Image (cartoon, grey):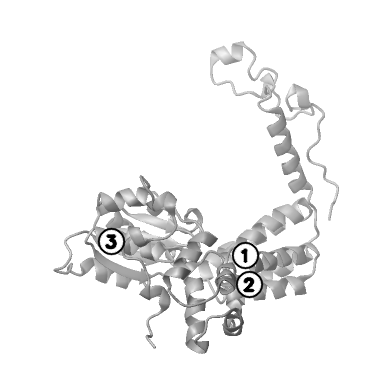
Amino acid sequence: MDTTPLAASIRPNTLSEFVGQAHLVGPDAPIRIAIEQKYVSSFILWGPPGVGKTTLARIYAKALNADYHELSAVSAGKDDIRKIIDEKSTLFSDGPKILFLDEIHRFNKAQQDFLLPYVESGQLVLIGATTENPSFEVISALLSRLRVFTLKELSEEELGTIIERAAVPMDADTKTFIIQIANGDARQALSLIDTTRRYYKDVTVENITKSLQDTRLRFDKGGEEHHNTISAFIKSMRASQPDAALYYLARMLEAGGDPKFIARRMVIFASEDIGMEDPQALVLANAVFRAVEVIGMPECGINLSHGVIYLSQAPKNKAAYNAYNAVMDEVKKSGNLPIPLKIRNAPTKLMKDIGYGAGYEKYTEEDLLPEKLKGKKFYKPSKEK
C-alpha cells in the first residue's frame, strides 16, 4: 500500500481545487486577488486545525513562483531562519523568498523580534500560520507588518466534498460519522479514513471506532469534549474542590490543550468568581499566566497546578462580576445620559464659563452618577458564592 498520507495525496494545488474559506478565496476575495495579481505581502493565516492554512500558503507561493521554505516554530530557531535568508534562491524560482512558519505562536518574543528587520526590508516574505489569536501571541511590532486572514472551521458540506475527493469506498452513515468526529478539521477526517483503511481495509463505523484509540482525538479544540472539560475545570474551582480541578487540568494538558488558554480562563475566574473577596487572586492568576508564557510545557504545568489550588481554595464572591453586568445593562438601556457638569473636563475658558468643573471637590459624598441614575446601586458587596 502507498505510504503517502491521504491528506497529502489529495492536497489541492490550485484555488480551483481548494474547498472552503470562500470569504478569502471566492470571487473578489483578498487571497484570490493576491494570487491572481501576484501581489507580494506578508500575512498570517489564523484558524482552527485542518482548514487549509498550509495549502493556501503553498498555492500562493506557487503562483508567485517563489523560493518557498517551510518551518515549524515548534522545532525551528534563529539559525534555521538565518540559513534560509543567506541561501541563494534556486534557478527554478524568480519570485520572492517566502517563509511559511507553522505555529508561529510558538516563537518567543526574541525569535519574533529576529524576524522583524527581514520582513520589514522585504528580504523575507513571511506567512505565519496559527490556531491562536495573533493579538495575544504575535508581538505588536511584527503584527503591525502583517495582514491577518481568519479562516473558518469547515462546514459539514465542505468536509463531505473533501471526503468524496478521497475516493475511499464507504456508506452514507460512515461518511456522516467521520464528519461529526472531525469537527470541521479536514486533516483529522482524512487521517481517520487513512488509519482505518490501513488497519482494517474497509472503512466502516465499526472499524473507525476500533481505530480511535488516541484519546487526544477526544479533546479537539472547539469540539464538545473540549467544552465539557473546561466547563468541569471551572466549575470544580468554583465549588472549591482542588482535587477535581487538578484532575480536569491534567486531562486538558495530557490531551494537548493549550496551557495559555487554560491560564487565561484562570485570570477571568479570579475576577469573576473570587473578585473582592480576595483581590490577590487576580495578581496570582496573572503571575501564573506570565509563568506559562515564559516557561512553556511541560514545566508550566507546575505553575498551573499552583494557581489552580490557590483559586480553588480562595473564598468566592461574584459581586464585582455582577456589578459589571448590571452597569453594562444600564448603559445599553439608558444610553449617553448627561454627565454632571462638576465632573466634566474643562480644558478651555469657555467650558469653565458654562459651568464645566464648577464646584468639583476631590473628596465628596455627593452622588456623581447622571441625574436619572442618582441613588442607583450597581455594586452590592455582599458575599455571593
Mark linked to residue 252: 2
User: Disc 1 and disc 2: Cα gap in Å?
Assistant: 9 Å
Q: Which residue is mark 3?
A: 61
> As shown in the figure, which amino acid type bears the numbered disc 3?
Ala
In this view, the mark in front (3 or 1): 3
**Is 12 positioned to the left or the right of 303 in the image?**
left
Contact between marks 1 and 2 (CB within 8 A): the answer is yes
Q: Nearer the viewer, residue 374 or 70?
A: 70
Residue located beneath label 1 in the image: 262
Which mark, residue 240?
none
- Circle 1 — which element? helix
Quadrant of the drawing holding the C terminus: bottom right
Q: Residue 10: which quarter of the image?
A: bottom left
Q: Amino acid at mark 2?
A: Met
Residue 77 appears left or right of 271: left
Query: What percent of the width, then of the height, locates residue 183?
Result: 57, 66
Q: CA distance from mark 2 to mark 3?
A: 36 Å
The N terminus lies in quadrant: bottom left
